[in-house]
Amino acid sequence: MIRKINIWQELDWVTVILYAVLMLFGWINIYAAVYDEQHQSILDFNQRYGKQLVWIAAAVIIASATLLIDSRFYFYFSYLLYGLTLLLLIAVVLFGKEVNGARSWFYIGGLQIQPSEFSKVATCLALARRLSSHPIKLTSFVEMIKSLTVPGLIIFLPMILVGMQPDWGSALVYAVLMLVLYREGLPGQYLVIGVLFGVVFIFSLLWNETPEKLVVMLFLFSLAAWAFFYRSLRGVFIILTTYGAIYLAGIIFFHYGHWHFSAYYHHLVCITAALIAMFAMSWKKRRNDVAWIAVMLAVYLLSGYGVMYGFQHVLKPHQRTRIEIFLGQKYDPKKEGYNIEQSKIAIGSGGFHGKGFLKGTQTKFNFVPEQSTDFIFCTVGEEWGFIGSFVLLMMYLTLMLRLLYLCERQRSLFSRIYGYGVVSVFFIHVTVNIGMTIGLFPVIGIPLPFFSYGGSSLWAFTFLLFVFLRLDASRMELFR
Amino acid sequence: MNPYAFRRHIIGGIIVGVICIYVVRLFYIQVIDSSYKLSAQNNAYRRIVQYPARGLIYDRNGKLLVGNQAAFDLMYNPSEIQPFDTLELCSILQVTPAQLKERFRRVRTTKGYSRYRDQLLYSQLSEITYARLQEKLYKYPGLYVQERTLRRYLYPLAAHLLGYVSEVDSSHIRKDPYYQMGDYIGISGIEKAYEKELRGKKGVKIFLVDVHNRLMGSLENGKYDSAAVLGKNLVATIDIELQQYAEKLMKPFRGSVVAIEPATGEILALVSSPSYDPSLLVGQERKKNFPLLQKQANLPLYNRALAASYPPGSTFKLINALIGQQENVINEYTTHGCAMGWSFGPVQVGCHAHPSPLDLRGSIQYSCNSYYCDVFRRIIDNPRYSSTEEAYKIWRNYVLSFGFGQYLKTDLPDEGKGNVPSINYYNKIYGKNRWRSLTIISLGIGQGELGITPLHMANMAATIANRGYFYTPHSVKKIEGQDTLLHHFTEKHYTAIDPKYFEVIIDGMEKAVESGTAMYGRIEGIAMCGKTGTAQNPHGKDHSIFICFAPRQNPRIAIAVYVENAGFGATWAVPVASLLVEKYLKGSISRPWMEERIVNAHIY
């Protein structure tokens, strides 16, 4: 039985207000980013801020329409929507327009549509539907793998298709849906392994010139592996102390011995020693784990060095450039590291208070590329300073935590899982986008939700969010 | 309750954790670390690109062929520009105010325009304009002059071999992110083939600029600057004197000359006539001249020497003579009678007056058609093979082993493939099993569907000169800072013919020059070996063809000459090749009357 509810009463207005504020703040910053004395009219539709205003108006319509549709629609049509977006993704690889070496866009009339933005919504819906009827089984390893096959494919298919555009930056977003699986019962260790291998893969490519950094990663890895297998911090401390002691001894020894030794080998020796210590302890305790740790290490080393070696020696220069574009380094094809530095300078020069609205245009325009899309956070950092950046981060944090709260009050499994999908997608976008502008993340060109310039991403995020708000508003329709 | 409900706290914790790290990081770079805070005066940069000079090109004897000259581009930065005396600037630049305004408007509306990025206003100012502008530049803040280099050709020669450079277009930029609007790139010839070596590497200097647009020194002591790397110099394989002479001789004709050093595969001269002066395509001149060259009916921009595919005519008899020997269907004593032609049933091939019967040497000396119709029939109707198709396949493989019908993979772009018809081709025309040796008998004398480029032809001459192998022809001898060429250019490519069969052929070729079809080209004191050809073609009069190499022992030069629509091989192609051989081997000409006859030829 279904109880009729008033959608406007049940709607979570906190989220809606956050959404509206973010969107307007975003528009103000796009205006500042494109601002130019020659084009001062706000309604100049040849300029990006003028266009964004149109996109925002359309987003409001999309939001309202999304709310007016019956919530069961999203459940029953989830697979169909998913199938349709897969078709669109295939079509865009075949017939899309090539921009910056990737086929991600359809041009219909004057409108540009990026299907990979919308496929996130459909993927979350399909995943929620599957998991709500077929929960992850943990009775045995085989059972678990079986129950994970379909959800895994649901995530994997759009990821591969987006990667084929090729836009591996956007494809990476899908990996975050592991968080949803985790919430629904996936053992934590797989989450850790997944994250670690992602890190290894990306950083092996980005840090191809410094083996030292791989050593550091190796070290972090061994710590993680230890923590993971023993669920205790004892091993971590042992490794840290072994490492520190040997390192110190080495420094003293080299210093007094006047014997020069490359830092790289120094670290390598220390880590080897620390790992041996770890193995020795594992041996005493649970022999089975030693084999596991060894296998993981071997895979880790092979993949890390394999990727690095392949990148440097096997690939031809133009293929390397392609991969750099895959990784979103299209902004920095000459690897000067210059743009990131510019982005940091723009943000850093904002100081505590910021330079003020429209007053920060001098430095960043010259060098920070994609100012109104992927690097929009630079404008915030420069013109609104630490205060503005902090407030923006807090708004995103509030939004995500609010959504988490909403997730947990759902009565239907479908709504909750979908809600977690929404949170995860927002989380990865905010993390990657802001992280790259402040130099904590490699440059991967994905937009800041509700903030970056662009119709497709704004509409897709709006749709993503309001489907959840619609589901949330009708949670009382279900009796339990 | 869901057993994993506690995991919401972990997920929430991860989110809060990341945001906290970001807040700390922001606090650090925005509030604590002052290195990111550039003072208010140093709030603009000027990024000045350092363009390296393009590599120079020398000929094989060290003579400079292609150098550089300075050119000046007028740039401006829209955000720094201030109202100025338009009339004065217009008079310096010699444009009307309306044109200047239009120019600014065009720049503003181009894709990728940014108020804060330097824009190109006028490219390649003349030196005089530059000198006058330089004095007044202080009056125009935001305007500045960027120095560039343009190509300078020291000889009006070898346009097809050297190629030309031009500004990049958007497709180049898409393919290689190194290029930016306004950069130059090699479009054809050596300039294109060795673009990566010639271009060097752009550098960049980043300066801090104050609000009054004064340079305040480099950004962070040049931490982000990169030095420009000069382009590498090249030594080309051509001999510019030989090239010059070849172009002079070919001036009255349409056609090509390709000369190769057999012992290395180095291209000594490459002429495609009509040609043009490479200086016509430098800088601003190109805009004016390129369309004019494009419109000319005799296609001066088309590289005939590499791309044009002609029937090889009688020169191809050499190949059939070699294949016949290798297949053991003829030997040096095989004779054949000829009475002004050859006929078999309805098929008739004409021949010219010469002694009869002839042996293999004589058949080459006098270029007998009957002989080679017979040889071709012996090859294709060889009872060892079960079908025409099978025998043809064997024959075709021999032909392909000389490099015909495929790209030779020289270092030059625009190479043509030519054509050696496939079995499928004949099956399509005549039907499967419905063609015989007689159907395709014209292949025996180098006619029919065969398509061979002058480069292939010269390579064939070099292959015979080497008695059975060739080095892939190439146009560059040495790249500065590089010890060796690609392996591809230094390895011997053997044909499928045993070297022992070549000597007989070469006997015939020497006799052809001494007292045969090419005796007009005989040079006192040089043992030249050659073979004439006359290619029937659907475009009018026959093409006059000659290939040769000299001297017979340790050959130093192999040449192929094509003169389009000029009649017998002996008439024009032979004297051209003969003069070139003499010029190259002796350094001077002993037959000025012959040279005069060619230079004054009017055959079209």
Image (cartoon, grey):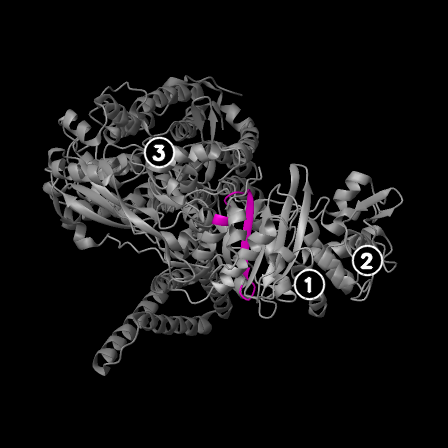
What range of the chain is rendered magenta? Answer: B248-264
**Disc 3 designates what residue?**
A449
Q: Chain of mark 3?
A: A
Residue shown at the point (39%, 40%) measured from the top left:
B281
Residue under label 2, please give it: B356
Mark 1 and mark 2 residues within 8 Å of each other at the beta carbon: no
Q: Amino acid at mark 1?
A: Lys
Q: Is residue A354 above or below residue A8?
A: below
Disc number for residue A81: none
Quadrant in the picture for the N terminus of chain A:
top right
Q: Nearer the viewer, mark 3 or mark 1?
A: 1
Crowding around mark 2 (Cα neighbors within 10 Å: few <14, some 14 to 19, many 20+) is some
Nearest-to-viewer mark from 2 and 3:
2
Mark 1 Cα-neighbour bin, 10 Å: few <14, some 14–19, many ≥20: many
Instruction: First in sequence, mark 1 or 2: give its number.
Output: 2
Q: Nearer the viewer, residue B462 or A375?
A: B462
- Helix, strand or loop for disc 1: helix
Do discs 1 and 2 share a chain? yes
- Dot 2: element: loop
Q: Residue pushed farthest right?
A: B345
Q: Position of residue A139 (x, y in %)?
A: 57, 51
Picture disc at residue B511: 1
Type of amino acid under label 2: Ser
Residue B527, horizontal then vertical, whole percent = 60, 66
Q: State the separation of the CA atoms marked 2 and 3.
A: 92 Å
- Asked whether the viewer can see residue B413, the reply is no
Q: Is residue B539 above or below residue A479?
A: below
B458 or A86: nearer the viewer: B458
Q: Amino acid at mark 3?
A: Pro
